[in-house]
Structure formats: C-alpha cells, structure tokens
Amino acid sequence: MLAKIALMIIFAGLALSAFGQSVKKPHLPILNGAAIILPKPEYSQDLQDLCAGGKVEVQVLIGKDGRVNEARAVTGDELLYEIAVNAAKKARFRTVADGRPIEQAGIVVYDFTPKLKCIDVGVANKRATSIPRPVLSTSGLNLSETQIVKVLIIEQVETGDVLRAKAISGHPLLRVACERSALKTKFSAANVDGAYFRVRAYLTYEFLPDGRIIY
C-alpha cells in the first residue's frame, strides 16, 4: 500500500513538473531592429529630476499590419513605464515572414540616461535626522486597515535637503500629506565631490487604524 502511494506521489510530481514547463513563457525576441517607425519616449525634465533612468522593456503584440495592438512594460523603472508604453504603441514594424504578413510578439527596449549622477540607496527612513509628521488635510478619512505610503525622494547630499518628492504607492488621500512631509525631511550632509551628485531613496509611512503613524 505504501509503495502504491509512493508511486502515486512520484507520478503526480512528474505531472506537475511537466505542466510547469508547459506554461513557461517563451523567450520573446527584441524587436527594435524590426521597427520601421520607433518614436522616442517623452523623457521630460521632471522625470530626469527624479533620477528616473535605466532600461525599460515593453512587451508588445504586433498585428499583421505592423501596428502595435497591445503594449505593457514588464521591467525597469516604474516611473518610466507610461512614457515607454505610449511610445511603443506608436511604433510600426515589418511583419512579413515567408512572403506573408504575420502577427508577432516581442520586446521593445528603451534606454534612459538621466543627466544627473544619481545613486539609489533604497529605503532611507533610518538615515533621516528628522521626518515631520504628515498633516492630513482630508476630513472623513476612515482607515479601517493599515495603509503604507511609499514616497520617492531625491536628496542633495551636500546639504541634506530633499529636492523632490513623489508618492508612488498607497492610498491616494494620504499621498499629498506624505509628499509634503518628505520635502521637509532632513538628512545629514555629506562631503562628496561633484555638484551634480544626488541620492535617490524612499521614505515609507505606515498609517495605523488607531491614528498612529510609523515612519
């Protein structure tokens, strides 16, 4: 009986393994070189000031007419997803194989290089010398469960000041208050060569149902 159960477990494991292999996504080709028209994303000064940069990959589904039917960003800086997807949707591609038009899926890669020299340090709450308590101006906000707001900040290491702040997650009614708090947050100044050196980091605010805020 035990041997029979053991064999059943082995067969089940092999079946699950085979299923896992069957549903793996195929490796998609990079299609930049197949583009007839490949518009550049609108890389605004605002995004550069937020140190948004690096490679962004957009997965596209191209119709037989060479137009992009679907596009979604799959890797890279989330701040750049929208402009990368918008640019990819305007692209046009060659879609002929063996003399016939075909549908095709693939990846479009965009490489963004900010003018500022930025270093990403992750969550910086413990590095701050002071973080003002967020002032909630919205009345009637009922927090029945814990809410966490994540704010991207750009810090000038020579002064310890926060130059830019943008909430990228959390309850919409809490984001403005957290951005204002982040802009007033102070860090210790550092002796670093180069006037254009910036630190990209995050501050997190945890709003509890009992009214406490942990940051």
Image: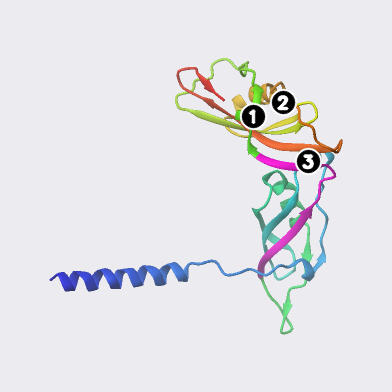
On residue 195, the disc is: none
Quarter of the image with the N terminus in it: bottom left
Quarter of the image with the C terminus in it: top right
Q: Which one is closest to the eye, mark 3 or mark 2?
A: 2
Mark 2 nearby-residue class (10 Å; few <14, some 14–19, many ≥20): some
Indicate whether 184 appears above or below 115: above
Indicate whether 102 appears above or below 197: below
- Between the C-alphas of marks 3 and 2, the distance is 25 Å
Label 3, secondary structure: give it: helix
Residue span colored magenta: 104-121
- The residue most toward the left is 1
Indicate whether 68 appears above or below 144: below
Of labels 1 and 2, earlier in sequence is 1
Q: Is residue 161 magenta-colored?
A: no
On the image, numbered disc 1 is attached to which residue? Answer: 127
Indicate whether 76 appears above or below 193: below
Lateral position of residue 8 relative to residue 46, left or right: left
Of labels 1 and 3, earlier in sequence is 3
On the image, numbered disc 2 is attached to which residue? Answer: 188
On the image, numbered disc 3 is attached to which residue? Answer: 47
